[in-house]
Image: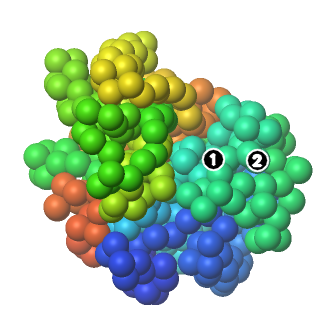
Amino acid sequence: MTASGLLDRIMDVGRDRARGGYSRHAFDPAEAELREWFTAEAGWLGLDVETDRNGNIWAWWGAPGPDATVTGSHLDSVPGGGAFDGPLGVVSALDAVGILQRKGFTPGKPFAVVVFAEEEGGRFGVPCLGSRLLTGSIDPDKARALRDPDGVTLADAASRAGYDPSRFGPDREALSRIGRFLELHVEQGRGLIDLDSPVAVGSTVIAHGRWRFSFRGQGNHAGATLLTDRRDPMLPAAATVAAVRRIASEVPDARATVGRLVPTPGGTNVIASTVDLWLDARVPGTGLTESLVEDIAGAAAEAAEAEGCSVTVSKESYSDTVTFDGGLRDRLSGVLGGVPELPTGAGHDAAILAPHVPSGMLYVRNPTGISHSPEEFAEAADVDHGARALADVLEDLSR
Ligand code: GLV
Ligand code: MN
Ligand code: MN
């Protein structure tokens, strides 16, 4: 089945009627259904499916072993996300295996399709959780203690879904088998529209991280408390949202976003006692993201003091700038006949793996230039072109 046909098959799984788009999060029913669907599709291709200690799924074409060519992506989404971010890389991998099988190709090296768990951090806040745990770039105790918006820990959610969270942690065996990793992904900006090309080879991923700002004041009555008597944490939170745009605008090529803000207790006639907001900050280069966040934290502290409130800032995740493996990039470009190279501001499991194994990415054109939104899109012709390009490079990489 073509990649576009496979995508059609899962178009009804995890639709979010309230937000629009899809909400497919770690250990929720939609994600479980997608895992089952993937296992069945891989089974029809004759692949052997196993789930590793961190909840990542591996579908092996032939026996598992070292120096494996591995491709894949993720099936979870951001809240109210699009249909392509993640699943496109998974369906393209399955299509590519089918294409190679139909032409009678047999890999000369171990070969696997992987589905990484909780790439978006849409439920537990830390992105690329499956690949971070596998590579040892997050402490498993810290991971187990992460909480979703309802206060459920990752450990509890995993247990309820039938996983054993005590096994979460670095997986040397899984990592040492990967000879090279290639992730196909929908383009998440306008890069390929401007380049007028259906596919590109990934060059770099900019440094990015997430920080939580917790403002504390005094919860109180909206009618009985004079304005002069208030310590309302919503004010420094709002000032911080404005400061994020103002300060980041002065840093070349910086991106900084507050996409989530939670007042507690959250009543119309209640002055909040606390407001939490989450900052997503990304600046190309080394050390510049942290210094941007320091400046924003300074503005937040000033705004908090002016209202008689306090603020604490904690880093929830961080990934340095990644440049994908030069040899692999050249090889992909060679096989694909000199398609353009493209940097990205989006994070990926391929970037988490890159410091450990040669890793690379292929992007497929997105005519809306929009992502993490229901408007994210790729034409069926481009989707299938991308899967054929993936098949070509996988054939070359796994001879
Ligand atoms: C994932 O897509 C991210 O860049 O946040
Ligand atoms: Mn994403
Ligand atoms: Mn993605």
236 sits to left or right of 26: left
The image position of residue 112, as x and y in percent, is 67, 58
Location of mark 1 (residue): 129
The image position of residue 59, as x and y in percent, is 70, 65
Q: Nearer the viewer, residue 84 or 26?
A: 26
* Kind of residue at disc 2: Arg
Establish whether ligand 1 lies closer than 8 Å to the Cβ of label 1.
no
Q: Looking at the rendered structure, which numbered label has been put on residue 112? A: none
Residue 246: name its quadrant: top left
Identify the element where label 1 is drawn.
helix
Is any atom of residue 97 visible in this view?
A: yes
* In front: label 2 or label 1: 2
Establish whether ligand 1 lies closer than 8 Å to the Cβ of label 2.
no
Picture residue at 36% right of the left edge, 78% below the top:
18
Picture residue at 62% right of the left edge, 78% below the top:
29
Crowd around label 2: few <14 · some 14–19 · many ≥20 (10 Å): some
326 sits to left or right of 248: right
Q: Nearer the viewer, residue 148 or 106?
A: 148
Picture residue at 44% right of the left edge, 35% below the top:
217
* Kind of residue at disc 1: Leu
Crowd around label 1: few <14 · some 14–19 · many ≥20 (10 Å): many
Location of mark 2 (residue): 144
Identify the element where label 2 is drawn.
helix
Q: Are marks 2 and 1 in contact (CB under 8 Å)?
A: no
Is any atom of residue 134 visible in this view?
A: no
338 sits to left or right of 220: left
385 sits to left or right of 208: left
The image position of residue 106, as x and y in percent, is 65, 64
